[in-house]
């Protein structure tokens, strides 16, 4: 079943949404929150996760109309097409099956008439047995010593996902030290090399194509450095690859037993669930890696089966479209209240902006409405002392996702209480602000009567700034998998509604081509 091809702005529901927007655009979150059961009616719970979207400029009618739009453009069918392995990445002629990578069901998924589930299971077994050998110290380097350091060499989708997950799951990490080399900037690889001992380092070269300039250049540099103290016969003990390009991997000198598979039905930025996540399994152990996949699968089933008005990724996608296309907000902030998640905004920037930064629709026509949001952010509370000024009092409307955890991992309850007080404090400050009257009273009671006239306007917070609260019980591999899958499905939902192809990325090509040309002419 092909994806429907409908300009959303020509639909009935869009027309209704436009009228509805004109009716309620000046609505205030403060007033909405006075309605009985506002929080209950505008939040969703799903095991260890609660998504509270009550503090948005929306009413029940807004959600109903957005859901109607989702239905009108065929979202349900599009979700099924993705899960069933249809060629929804039309421009590249590929299926998009990161969901199959984490599926534990026995239901087959066919590509060209062949069930891909057995290959996925076999790759997982290989990841497990290899990780166990390296972590237990049974895998020896060329001088007989166990491995102490892992270096992931890759870029884009072959770097950002594993790097973000390894950082986020530091609490669960084993004794191995994991490094990431990505940039073509030689200073990056040099800084990593200087910390390494070739006898005890394992290099994981991750490149779906094995032609990416950065990854191949960094790998060659590292190989040359390695060969200063070892021989080519030692390479199998220290270099493994994750790739679809077996010929290029072989030419590089990597033993064929040390190659982990990749498939062209997994997009780079959605590939951490495949062997691209090998460095995750090495860093936190296979069981934790598996728990990450299971968390994602839980969200997959929710996305596939739940009605749209109770469906977390769908609701978040619809609210985002509401701001992007009706309020014309240009950006969204992602604000995790966990230092572990400091790399999440970078990761999401690629996932979201590479997927939905498209100006041509599924008909090949230039689009005359807004698509992909710009996403940015950083961790709380640090960012409160940095950019939050603009979000609170600036001239731009910036919807924000707050991500938090009810429990901390090390159990410093005093810290955690303060952290979460800030989390809820920021959300409330954005939504409710501080009125002239409140500031007036405050200044009056502080005894600074003469300051009232001078300071009042600067101390007012107009409020009415929207946010979602995405609150988990605890940061675990399982809950992290769920969080990432939540955003993945939000991306696809938005792509379907905007009538674009989310899974190609031609926009990254031109600059690469020109760089190559320049290299050849100089
Ligand atoms: C992601 C993109 C891109 C890709 C890198 C690395 O969706 O496709 O970021 O992951 O360009 O590509 P290779 O894995 O082929 O080296």
Image (spheres, grey):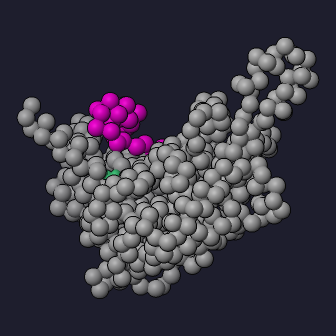
The residue stretch that appears in magenta:
176-204
Q: Quadrant of the C terminus?
A: top left
Q: Is residue 181 magenta?
A: yes
Q: Is residue 440 magenta?
A: no
Q: Residue at x 77, y 36 (%)?
A: 434
Point out the residue furthest to the left here.
Answer: 521
Of residues 440 and 260, the one nearer the viewer is 440
Residue 347 is left or right of residue 312, and the answer is left
Whole-percent x and y of residue 138? 44, 57
Residue 286 is left or right of residue 234, and the answer is right
Whole-percent x and y of residue 91? 26, 66
Q: Is residue 201 above or below residue 74?
A: above
Q: Residue at x 33, y 36 (%)?
A: 189
Q: Is residue 429 visible?
A: no
Q: Residue at x 74, y 39 (%)?
A: 433
Residue 441 is left or right of residue 411, and the answer is right
Where on the picture, by quarter, is residue 477?
A: bottom right
Q: Quadrant of the N terminus?
A: bottom left
Whole-percent x and y of residue 258? 30, 61
Whole-percent x and y of residue 22? 59, 56
Q: Is residue 346 above or below residue 490?
A: above
Ligand 1, what quadrant? bottom left
Q: Residue at x 32, y 66 (%)?
A: 362
Q: How many marks?
A: 0
Q: Is residue 55 visible?
A: yes
Of residues 63 and 519, the one nearer the viewer is 63
């Amino acid at each position: 079943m092909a994806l429907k091809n409908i300009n959303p702005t020509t639909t009935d529901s869009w027309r209704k949404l436009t009228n509805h927007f004109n009716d309620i655009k000046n609505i205030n979150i403060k007033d909405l929150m006075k309605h009985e059961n506002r929080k209950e009616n505008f939040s969703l719970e799903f095991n260890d996760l609660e998504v509270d979207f009550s503090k948005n400029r929306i009413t029940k009618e807004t959600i109903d109309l957005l859901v109607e739009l989702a239905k009108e453009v065929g979202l349900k069918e599009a979700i099924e097409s993705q899960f069933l392995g249809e060629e929804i990445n039309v421009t590249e002629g590929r299926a998009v099956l990161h969901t199959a990578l984490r599926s534990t069901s026995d239901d087959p998924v066919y590509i060209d008439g062949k069930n891909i589930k057995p290959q996925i299971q076999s790759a997982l077994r290989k990841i497990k047995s290899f990780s166990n050998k390296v972590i237990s110290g049974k895998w020896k380097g060329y001088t007989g010593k166990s491995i102490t350091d892992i270096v992931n060499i890759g870029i884009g989708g072959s770097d950002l996902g594993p790097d973000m997950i390894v950082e986020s799951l530091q609490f669960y990490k084993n004794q191995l030290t994991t490094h990431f080399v990505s940039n073509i900037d030689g200073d990056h690889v040099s800084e990593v090399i200087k910390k390494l001992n070739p006898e005890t380092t394992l290099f994981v070269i991750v490149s779906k194509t094995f032609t990416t300039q950065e990854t191949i250049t960094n790998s060659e540099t590292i190989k040359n450095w390695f060969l200063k103290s070892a021989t080519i016969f030692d390479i199998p003990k220290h270099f493994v690859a994750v790739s679809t390009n077996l010929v290029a991997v072989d030419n590089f000198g990597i033993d064929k037993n040390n190659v982990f598979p990749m498939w062209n039905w997994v997009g780079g930025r959605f590939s951490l669930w495949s062997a691209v996540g090998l460095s995750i399994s090495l860093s936190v152990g296979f069981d934790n890696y598996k728990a990450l996949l299971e968390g994602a699968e839980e969200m997959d089933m929710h996305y596939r089966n739940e009605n749209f008005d109770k469906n977390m990724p769908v609701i978040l996608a619809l609210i985002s479209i509401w701001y992007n296309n009706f309020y014309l907000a240009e950006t969204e902030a992602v604000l995790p209240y966990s230092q572990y998640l400091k790399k999440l905004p970078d990761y999401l920037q690629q996932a979201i902006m590479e997927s939905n930064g498209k100006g041509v629709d599924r008909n090949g026509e230039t689009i005359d409405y807004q698509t992909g949001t710009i996403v940015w952010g950083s961790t709380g509370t640090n960012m409160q002392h940095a950019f939050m000024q603009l979000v609170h009092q600036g001239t731009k409307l910036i919807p924000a996702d707050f991500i938090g955890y009810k429990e901390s991992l090390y159990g410093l309850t005093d810290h955690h209480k303060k952290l979460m007080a800030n989390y809820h404090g920021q959300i409330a400050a954005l939504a409710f602000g501080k009125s002239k009257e409140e500031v007036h009273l405050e200044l009056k009671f502080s005894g600074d009567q003469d300051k009232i006239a001078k300071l009042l306007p600067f101390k007012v917070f107009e409020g009415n700034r929207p946010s979602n609260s995405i609150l988990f019980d605890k940061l675990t591999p399982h809950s992290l998998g769920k969080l990432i899958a939540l955003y993945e499905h939000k991306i696809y939902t938005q792509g379907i509604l905007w009538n674009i192809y989310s899974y190609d990325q031609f926009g990254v090509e031109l600059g690469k081509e020109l760089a190559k040309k320049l290299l050849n002419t100089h």
